[in-house]
Amino acid sequence: MKKTSLFLSACVLSACSSYQVPDSPAFSAAETWAIMPMANHSNTPLAAEKVEQLVATQLYAKGINTVRYPAIQATDLQSILDDGAKQKQAQAWLSNQRVNYVITGSVEEWHYKSGLDGEPAVGITLEVKSARSGQTYWRASGSRGGWGRESVSGTGQIVIEELLDGLTITPRESN
C-alpha cells in the first residue's frame, strides 16, 4: 500500500512539468557569454525580460559571468513592444563585442491559470549559440505548472534551473 501511494504521488507530481533537455557539449565558464533578447510568445508583457534576468542569475550561480545587451532607448509604446527593433539593436551591439557564446530563447507561457487556485504556468525554451557564426550548440525547453500559492517567477526560476542544469560547464582555472 505504501509503495502504491508513493508511486501515485510521483505520477501526479511529474504530470505538472515537462522537460526536453539534451546532453550539451562542454562549455567553458571562462569564455565570454552574452544574453540576447528572448522572444515573448506569452500574453504577459515583459515576460522575456524577466526570464533574461533569471537566466543571468542562474548562469552566475554556475560561475558564468554574462554581459547583457543594452536596454533599448524607447520613446513610445510601439518601440517598447517591437521585438524586431530590440533584436536589431542587440545584434548591432553584439557585432562590436568580444563574445564567444550567446544565450537566447523564447517564453511560450508566463501567467497564472484562471480558476479558483490560479496556479502559475511557465513554458521556456533556451538555446546556446556561437556569437560569430550563429550556429546553435544546445537547445532545451521546459514547462511547469506550479501550485496555488507559488509565484510565476518562482515557477520560472525552477524551469530555468532545470534547463540550465543540462549544460556541461567546465569551471574557470584558478590562479
Image (cartoon, helix red, strand yellow):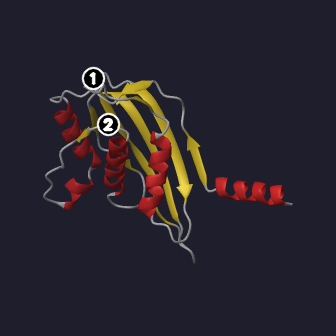
Front residue of 67/41: it is: 67
Position above or below: 164 against 133: below
Question: Secondary structure beneath disc 1?
Answer: loop
Q: Residue at x 45, y 33 (%)?
A: 167
Q: Residue at x 32, y 36 (%)?
A: 64
Q: Which disc is residue 174 wearing?
A: none
Q: Residues within 10 Å of mark 2 (few under 14, many from 20)?
A: many
Circle 2 sits on which residue?
64
State the quadrant of the C terminus.
top left
Hey, what amino acid is under mark 2? Ile
Front residue of 171/33: it is: 171
Circle 1 sits on which residue?
132
List the single residue furthest toward the front: 175
Whether residue 127 sits left or right of residue 21 in the image: it is left
Q: Position of residue 41 (x, y in %)?
A: 41, 51
First reached walking from the N terminus: tag 2 or tag 1:
2
Q: Residue at x 17, y 30 (%)?
A: 97
